[in-house]
Image (cartoon, coloured by chain):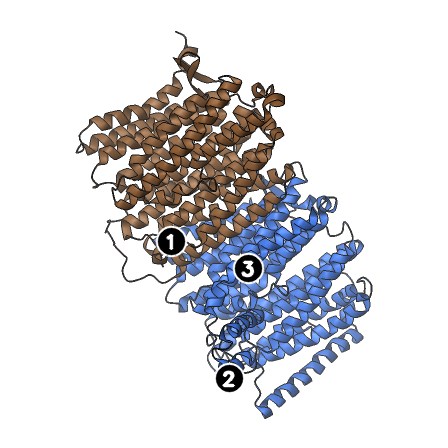
Amino acid sequence: MNWQAWDNYFPPLVLFTSLGTGVIIFLLGAERHRLRISLNMIGAVLKLGLVGVMLWGVFHEHTYEFRVLLLPGLYLVLWADAFAMFFTSLSAVLWLLTTVYAVGYLEDAPNNSRFFGFFSLCVTATMGVAMAGNLFTFFIFYELLTLSTYPLVVHRGTPQSIRAGATYLKYTLFGSVLLLLGIVWLYTLAGRQDFTVGGGSELEFLADTHAWQLRVIFLLLIAGLGVKAALFPLHGWLPQAMVAPAPVSALLHAVAVVKAGAFGIVRVVYDVYGVVFAHALGVTTILAVLAAITIVYGSLRALNQDDLKRRLAYSTVSQVSYIALGVALAGPLSTIGGIVHLVNQGVMKITLFFCAGNLAETLGIHKISEMNGVGRRMPWTMGAFTLAAFGMIGVPPMAGFISKWYLGLGGLEANQPWVLAVLLASTLLNAAYFLPILQRVWFQPTPATWPAEHHTGRWETSLSLLMPPVITAALALIIGLLAGAPFSPLEWVKLIAEREYR
Amino acid sequence: MLVLISLAVPLLLAIALSNHRGRHAIPLLLPVAALPVLALALLQSVSTLELPWLLQGTQLGVDELNRPLLLLAALIWTAVGCYARGWLLEQESRKVRFQLFYLLTLSGNVGVLLAQDVVGFYFFYALMAFATYGLIVHDGSPMARRAGRIYMALAVGGEALLLCALWFIADASSGFNIKLADLAAHIAEMPQRDLVVGLVLASFAVKMGSVPLHIWLPASYRCAPTPASAALGGIVIKAGLLGWLRFLPLGQVALPEVGEICIAVGMLSAFYGALVGVLQERPKTVVAYSSISQMGLLTALLGVALTAPAIWPSLVNLMVLFSLHHGIAKAALFLGVDVAGRNMPGSGWLLTLPALALAGAPLTSGAVAKLGFKEAGSLAPGDWSHWMPLLLTLSSGATTLLMARLLYLAWPRQSGRLPSPWLLTPWLGLLVALWLVPWWWSITQLPGLLPRALEASALLDSAGVLIGCSVVAVIVWGIGRITRLRYVLPEGDVVILGQWLSLWKRNMGLSAAKLPKLTMVIGVHNWNVLNGERYLLHWPVAGLGFLALFVVLVFLLVR
């Protein structure tokens, strides 16, 4: 067996680092805290290392592909192209940080082994979604993601979280049905194909005879994926799901579920239909309009939420559609803006949710109206929050500015100047719902007591809660500030766009 | 290297504030935070530093346009830094917060001046705009918070318009990030030139306080602590001017319609600022309104430049002269009002010096600048060439009235002691600089202007205006004395009118008895009575909505 063949076991190995961890955690007793934490950390670090090696390989145009025949003619394919690696790296980095955070957050809570087990499964599924090499594989991991997230959403077991979990299942399973229908229809029509970078030419022979069928299939696929990506009007589950524990919300909004949907949309447009062909079919325009509506609608709904996590959730609804918008505009520049937002939004939003979790865990603050003067009590947490919020508004030098800059340029390049209006409206609305929070946090007098304060020793909160948001906020700053540096997400996305449009 | 140091020093000081031990040293360092900028303005040759990894490839550097403004920035920030040091000694709380926002505003300001690329400029401009908020709301009073809210709504709207302009600019170029030096020629050839020019004008008009986008300015300047107001009114406001100078196709194409709009808006602001300012009760507010008025003059001159690209090289030197003159005088006025408020003996007379300069009295920098303005005004398009010199003379008169009002309000009522040297030295330093720097600039860059300003006829002209208006001021004051009329308009004029209207609507039928009180302009001096809080709560939302609508309409029109 030569080195070349070994290489192809990298993708399943990456999956195994978290799958194996998850299985072992399930088998462990609930009281084995230390061992569980070590396992989690070892898994996360190992995965990061593997992903690092693969990044290097993919940069040098190496392709990792792992293929197993499941049923006659139906392959399970795991591969790593530039785009897959982009999402995989994001997940690997943020998983590590979220694990650290979750350990601190759930220190004394019951049912930790159930939580961390499903947590690992959830990450496995996300990795699988990222590295899926065809729609069939994608669907398998996409479903695994749905099922492994449910126990996390209902983890607290309160009536409210059970209800949120039920809504989540209703929405996502309905989406899965549509997605499956679309996939099966497409397979019967066009055969079982793998994703092809810059491809879709395989579908073009159907353009004359089956154009309408292809359009309907596209809509089915987008609707199925749109549930997870929280496209309007399929976003209803997301704000409810914020009852989940903070690390889950953080992962849900930044990497796992929502991003899996957005990632799928990108795959369908670029690597199933091919962006040129999809544009010729006219389906991208529908997607662009839907995304634009979602962007504005999500921001409008965020304006008058007093619950911090709810406001953040509506902000996610709005921001994730930046990705869909960038893809749907079907130009190299908007592609850059959309795809780079996958990482930028992830890093910024996970910071915001970490901070929200810190407020809840340390001071018992859940509502924005309780946040007066909290900046003086928790300067580092709120400093991270402030950076991330400015990033969401799209103020340079934060990461969010880079996405918005390229999206706007892409809109002009695609000759769709209305995109600028949508982006500006979103900017102003983001300012309108984030700046008042910052005003409260930093400029209002501090109250004498907090709703439920836990004393935490030397730092403003325990270190494992404090470090993750500080690190992600720093990342969000660095990604934007050093956008021109080699190996920045922006440069990597330029590589992806170059390969898609080659 | 010096470029990086100038930017890094204030930023590093700001970061050092997070350290408990560092906090004790920073107030002492405030006065030196801008010294590298001084060295930069005086020593650095024209050059550009490229930082390809930063943002979209940031470029920083010194050129002929920003060098005098860097000098102005260094002077004002150093003086204000000394003053802030003295002011901080008197403060008991919120010291760290003030220093943080002070240093961030300073960094942003220096960055805006140094930026040589489009995205870099936008970044520093945003940094400056957001940091300014912290200075405005510093004292935490409801009024300051309200001022901050209005400021923020307008500032964010202005940023959005600028971003929109940047998108169009970048789209029409291949590199997406253009050097500011090439920008004028680039915009002049763009297909969407007029749209971009409109967006740029509107965006920076917020900072320049052009009517009707001035509503944030008076209350903000008045609420900010004195050193902050001096910096805002002296140099931060010039970032708006620099934005116009950098982003408009000046000297490239003639845009007569746009130019005339600028002249009209500028003249409107010049008179509006002066006349509403005269009716103010607080000295700092009067100084703030004079900023609106003076920036209006600059706007009008910009309008002339837009119509007549051929004379642009001499106009730009004139605008720089005016900026130097106005910046130093304005900072000196803000500091002086505070010093006079401490009843320092003789401070009234010293305060008269910058007031005279702003009013354009003979032998002041203002007289030179205004003569230059009048000469340029006679080159304005169409009928404006007749009206401009007259209007400029009238506006000098209005400024004289405004300054008379200021001196009346700020004149020390009792005799006190000398304030600490931290407060006194920077003020005196600025007064000296006011007679040195603008004169030096006009001698070296505008040959002939100074001798013409010293001719007997010019001296008589400006003296006549000054004396005439002073007489008017005395008469008006006398009438007020006799009839016991109080000439007062609340700060923030238009916003207050909006509040009244909304209250009026709400109160219709409910309490008609309140109406006369609410609609009476003269005599209302405390706007807390009005309880306009609820209306203003909606202000940012309404303001943003309006801007969004505006953008949409522009698109519809362009397509």
Letter of the chain that mark 1 sits on in the rendering:
B
Q: Nearer the viewer, residue B197 or B132?
A: B197
C-alpha distance separating marks 1 and 3: 40 Å
C-alpha distance separating marks 2 and 1: 41 Å
Q: Is residue A152 left or right of residue B296?
A: left
Which residue is label 2 attached to? B413
Report the number of numbered marks.
3
Which residue is label 1 attached to? B22
Q: Secondary structure at mark 2?
A: loop
C-alpha distance separating marks 3 and 2: 41 Å
Chain ID, brown in image: A
Q: Residue at x 33, y 37 (%)?
A: A98
Q: Secondary structure at mark 1?
A: helix
Marks 1 and 3 share the same chain: yes
Q: Nearer the viewer, residue A443 or B343?
A: A443
Q: Residue furthest bottom?
A: B482
Which residue is label 3 attached to? B543
Q: Position of residue B397 (x, y in %)?
A: 70, 76
Q: Above or below — where is B307 with respect to B436?
A: above
Letter of the chain that mark 2 sits on in the rendering:
B
Q: Secondary structure at mark 3?
A: helix
Q: Position of residue B103 (x, y in %)?
A: 48, 56
- Marks 1 & 3, CB-CB < 8 Å contact: no
Q: Residue furthest top?
A: A1
Residue type indicated by callout 3 = Gly
